[in-house]
């Protein structure tokens, strides 16, 4: 019974003295994923890669293409492991987009590793691209095949 009197006294003291009960504020992000994405593009164009990474990551939950752009930034900075990781996520989330396949293939070619996998990725990019836009992807495939000691893919 003493504890009940103590609790009542404590509550009365808090009430009359302006004591407040601690609470947690939950803030909603004021930007939409699309706004984060646009902001990331602007940061990237200005060469402000840390800001771009932060904003692409904020957008990536709803905009799968953000993973492709994250891969590009990391690749540009020579951070190949996170570039590879983000390209793989982009491929998984955007299976019909040739760009992440091509860029992951180019990453492998640049590093001189996984060239057979790079060839497969570049071939998939060529398959996915409309004929009129497949040129860059064919170039990647040709360079990978040259590195493998094969003839180029053009006839």
Image: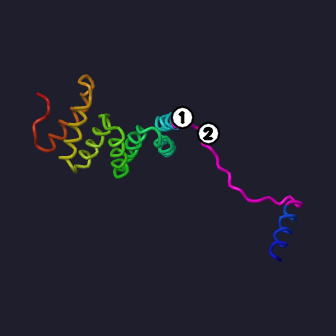
| Residue drawn at (34%, 44%) of the image | 87
Q: Of 137 and 125, which appears nearest the observer?
A: 125
Q: Is residue 18 above or below residue 84?
A: below
SS of the residue under disc 2: loop
| Residue drawn at (33%, 48%) of the image | 84
Circle 1 packing at 10 Å, graded few (<14), some (14-19), many (20+), is some
**Which residue lies most toward the right here?**
16
**Residue 98 picture location, percent across and down:** 29, 34
Question: According to the image, label 2 marks what residue?
Answer: 30
Residue 86 sits inside the magenta stretch: no
Q: Name the image colouring.
A: rainbow
Residue 32 sits inside the magenta stretch: yes
SS of the residue under disc 1: helix
Q: CA distance from mark 2 to mark 1?
A: 9 Å
Q: Magenta: predominant secondary structure element?
A: loop
**Residue 126 picture location, percent across and down:** 23, 32
Upstream in sequence: badge 2 or badge 1:
2
Q: Is residue 40 above or below residue 134?
A: below
**Residue 123 picture location, percent across and down:** 20, 37
Question: According to the image, label 1 marks what residue?
Answer: 35
Q: Of 88 and 69, which appears nearest the observer?
A: 88
């Amino acid at each position: 019974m003493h504890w009940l009197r103590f609790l009542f006294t404590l509550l009365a003291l808090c009430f009359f003295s302006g004591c407040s009960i601690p609470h947690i504020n939950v803030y909603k992000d004021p930007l939409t994923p699309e706004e984060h994405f646009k902001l990331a593009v602007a940061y990237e164009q200005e060469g402000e890669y840390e800001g771009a990474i932060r904003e692409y990551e904020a957008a990536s939950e709803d905009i799968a293409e953000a993973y492709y752009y994250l891969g590009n930034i990391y690749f540009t900075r020579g951070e190949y492991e996170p570039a590879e990781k983000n390209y793989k996520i982009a491929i998984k989330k955007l299976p019909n987009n040739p760009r992440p396949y091509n860029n992951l293939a180019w990453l492998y070619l640049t590093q001189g590793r996984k060239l057979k996998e790079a060839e497969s990725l570049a071939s998939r990019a060529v398959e996915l691209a409309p004929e009129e836009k497949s040129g860059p992807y064919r170039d990647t495939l040709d360079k990978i095949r040259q590195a493998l000691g094969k003839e180029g893919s053009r006839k």
